Image (cartoon, rainbow, N blue to C red):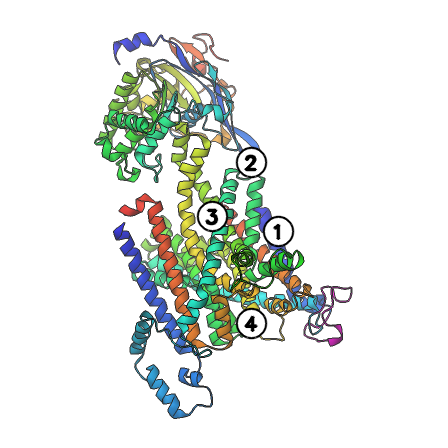
Amino acid sequence: MGNTNSLIGMSVFLLIVIAALLAPIFATHDPVQQNILFRLQGPSAEHWMGTDAVGRDIYSRILYGARISLIIGLVSVGLAMIVGTAMGVLAGYYGGKIDQLVTQITDVLLAFPSLILGLMIVAILGPTMPNLIIAIALTTVPQFARVARAPTLSLRERDFIQAGRALGYSDLRIMYRHVLPNIFPEVLVMGSLWLATAIRVEASLAFIGLGVRPPTPTWGGMIRDGFKNILDSPWLAIFPSLAILILVFALNMLGDGLRDTVDPRLKGEK
Amino acid sequence: MLRYVTIKLSYAMVTLFAVMLLVFMLARVIPGDPAQLMLGDQASQSAIDSLRERLGLDQPLYLQFLDFLTGLAQGDWGTSLYTREPVLNSILEVLPYTLELTAASLLFGAVVGIPFGIWAALHRNRFIDYATRIGSLLGLSFPAFVSGIMLLLVFGIWLGWFPVLSTARGGSFEDRLLSLALPTVNLGILMAAYIARMTRSSMLAVLGEDYVQTARAKGVARHLIIRRHALRNAIIPVVTVIGLYVGILIGNSVLTEIVFNRPGIGKLIVGSMNQRDYPMLQGLMVLYTLLVILVNLATDLVYGLLDPRVKYQ
Amino acid sequence: MMPENAVQSAKDTILKVEDLRIEFRIGRKWYAATRNVDFELKADETLALVGESGCGKSITCRAILGLVDEPGSRTRGSINFKGQELVGLPDRKFQHIRGKDLAMIFQEPMTALNPVMRVGEQISEAITSHMQVSGAEARRRTLELMESVRIPAPEQRYRDYPHQFSGGMRQRVVIAMALACQPSVLLADEPTTALDVTIQAQVLSELRELRERNQMSVIFITHSMGVVAAVADRVAVMYAGEVVEVAEVETVFKEPRHPYTQALLASIPSVESDKEDLQVIPGQVPSIVDFPEACRFAERCPHVMPRCRQEAPPRFQVGSTEVRCWLYESENGETGQ
């Protein structure tokens, strides 16, 4: 089941990435072009998913909105992966004071609900794309630090690492060449799962009103606008909601399936 | 046990101190002078200076931090820039609504998640197992506001079973219960998904343990093996994980409160954010930290009670 | 052993295992972890099941108790216990035999006990699972059992948890659980391997005493010929999932027939030692996926003949010994298939 799941998840994710990359080709309308004459229309042949309160085409906005979700998600998780893994490996490899410090920092950061922390940071710094990326990355760093630390601790005691030390290899080289490749599969699996979370958090912030500023379309922002018209034009909120759900679900399927492949013992744990 | 509690308590104190420092520093990072922010753009320089002095902003940072901590301890959490009310009063007024929602959804998550987790583990790789795994994965994939909107749309608007406008404040007991139902389910979906997955994997691990074989070899009935031997051991890691996820639950309660228009901390935080009410935001961060640390402490204690080995470590 | 045992060895068969075949599915194919497992257990005797780790002795033991029922496994052949066929018996019925008339002691006392349940409760559970007794009565019998396996101060230790016990004490708890309903057959899966040497000797002698007092038959699994000499009346030697030789204990030590048994005995420096290294036999035990259809020992056997690589040997009777080896084809007629 693991392989089928990750295959389905991967395919759906890639389809969405392609759709986002080729948004100008697939889009039927200009995503920011307002047309007051065609406002709040239901799905039709002309507007596949209807139009919003100022007459913009929802389908085209969803395609362009995917770009924001994917960029913020991928960059922030990529950053967090690099910083967090480095912290975790250093802590696990050197142990002692460094380990204590890193563990303390991760514990403090983990003590805080990530959505609240992200919300605070964006509220203070202002809702721009770099700030959103920093905020989401910061809340994700401790997760990677934790994932990288534990296996490094046990790897440190293994023969081939000890042999490397005996041969006089530098610590940096051992960490990079020997520790990293061994923990990489686990880190990668966490990456796809936390990418799902990052995209969820970005959408949530946008829903609260802390998304990338208009007129750039974001899924969370579209749902925020659509929610105002939920009684008479529910499709405004429904289509972008489905878009987020499908993307996040695909990533979770991918990560969950990968985890089964990487470590069959953990089947279905989260 | 006493030693264990003391250790956990001292850890909590360290974390609390560190987060307080973080909150304090964050407040200093806010662009602009707090005194200026409080008094507005039209204020005179002398008024700003005297406020700065009154707030202790002219003192060295560590003294300011000390003042901040003693203020918190004495219940002086600052004054809202918007309502001019003490921050603590505003928080305590809406806190019960959030706690009520969180507790209800935790209960929902456990009542739904634990049986499904056990059921799936006992039928590993059968239909119910796959269904539980896919279902819980789907549950984890809903941003809380997406599931909230869908629940509201289907059960509130289309079917009309539950009130669309919250009657959490005032109203009869029945009204309050009805208006609690959808938000509880919304927040509980995520919890149920986490708990089901955790219970399943924990059960699977325990079912492979030697002592389960021993119990079978003794001729203990199947339902007793599941309850007395497997579940009693499997539930221990589930409890710790529930503690960890309460933080996520609190975060998602913000979104749930907005969608269902319920009074609570979530609405307060978004409101103060829009009004740039920094003392209120700072107070809320302190509150969240306290909540998370208290929950973690409670989790550790429950863990200590469930696992007899803890007392002697 | 005591002289009266020699007389008793002519007694009735209490457990008879015939052509036991435990199979596991790997991918789409079924592989036999054991085949040609035949032996009998007579009333009041101790049968040692001996072989290297991975030879199938533990799983045979678990199969007798009906514990090999995970998905992707199946058991064929016959296990006859006091006239009742156990292979294919539904778990619901098996449950009333397990722990009552057929009990088992596991190898690892550190993991065999439930860590979150009081020791006394775990022992009394063995009683209440099979007998309708009051709580007070179950408790009284539990304390008696704890005393009989020499757990000091049972009254106080009743309420303790397993982690408060030493390894030897835990194994005594496991033994007490197994003896709770006075079973007629006890399966002991390397009950002393995980213990310190001095505790080992103690537990062994106590087990022997308990066996005589309770009139039980015992199947004793071990990899140690030293332990075999100390406890067994008869021996069944297993190699790569097969029983290759069954004989009286004296006969095995005096006249081992199967080349594997001979190698096993040759590899111990002396009978008294119980930590011998079986790895001195050249070659390796084949793994389950490439067990040969013919004789499984052929590749390591010093007396290997062309026929050994073509056909699996049947059981031959040599004196009182039953042996699966082509070397004995001419000596006597087959007894098995």
The amino acid pointed to by label 1 is: Ile
Q: Number of callouts in the render?
A: 4
Q: Position of residue A213 (x, y in %)?
A: 58, 75
Residue positioned most to the front: B172
Q: Position of residue B73 (x, y in %)?
A: 31, 69
Residues at discs 4 and 3 both on one chain:
no
At x 25%, y 12%, the residue is: C2
Residues at discs 3 and 1 both on one chain:
no
Residues at discs 4 and 2 both on one chain:
no
CA separation in Å, label 3 and label 1: 23 Å
Residue positioned most to the right: A45
Q: Which mark is residue C27?
A: 2
State which tag comes first along the sequence, 1 or 4.
Answer: 1
Relative to C318, is B5 above or below? below
- Disc 2, SS: loop
> Mark 4 — residue?
A209
Chain under disc 1: A
